[in-house]
Image: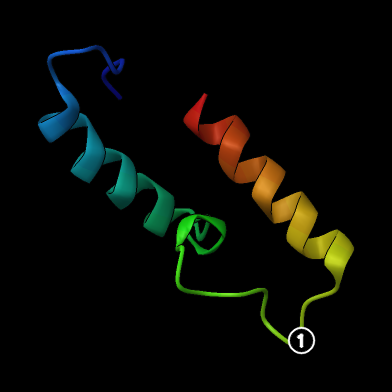
């Protein structure tokens, strides 16, 4: 993955989205979705943390 800088957002964003979908980490970033009913709060927090860690 290429590092994000001030000039490559248009390239970086779709690549990061693809990687997050492939790793099933995209859920916490979708602003229009909520935690699934079948998922506990702890599981949701853990998934959110994994997503943030992957992006970093």
Residue 37 position (above or below residue 16)? below
Q: Residue at x 42, y 50 (%)?
A: 20
Q: Nearer the viewer, residue 19 or 52?
A: 52
Where is residue 22 drawn, in percent x and y?
A: 39, 56
- Examine the rendered structure and indicate whether residue 28 appears above or below residue 39: above
At x 61%, y 31%, the residue is 53
In the rendered structure, the answer to whether residue 6 lies left or right of residue 49 reads left
How was the colour assigned to the protein in this rendering? rainbow
Give the camera-side residue of 52 and 1: 52
Q: Secondary structure at mark 1?
A: loop
Query: Which residue does the numbered mark 1 point to in the structure image?
Result: 38
Residue at position x 57%, y 58% from top? 28
The x and y percentages for residue 41 are 85, 67
Residue 22 position (above or below residue 11):
below
Residue 13 position, x and y percent, is 24, 38
Left or right of 14: which side holds 52?
Answer: right
Q: Residue at x 21, y 12 (%)?
A: 6
- Dot 1, how many residues are within 10 Å of its Cα: few (below 14), some (14-19), or many (20+)? few
* Image vertical order of residue 11 relative to residue 38, above or below: above
**Would you say 7 lies left or right of 16 here?**
left
Location of residue 7 in the rendering, given as x and y in whole percent from the top left corner: 12, 14
Q: Say whether residue 2 is left or right of residue 45.
A: left
Name the residue at the bottom extreme.
37
The total of numbered circles placed on residues is 1
Which of the 4 quarters of the picture holds residue 15?
top left
The image quadrant where one finds the N terminus is top left
């Amino acid at each position: 993955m290429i590092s994000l800088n001030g000039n490559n957002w248009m390239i970086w964003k779709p690549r990061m989205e693809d990687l997050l979908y492939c790793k099933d980490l995209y859920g916490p970033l979708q602003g229009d979705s909520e935690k699934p009913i079948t998922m506990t709060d702890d599981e949701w927090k853990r998934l959110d943390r994994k997503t943030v860690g992957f992006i970093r």
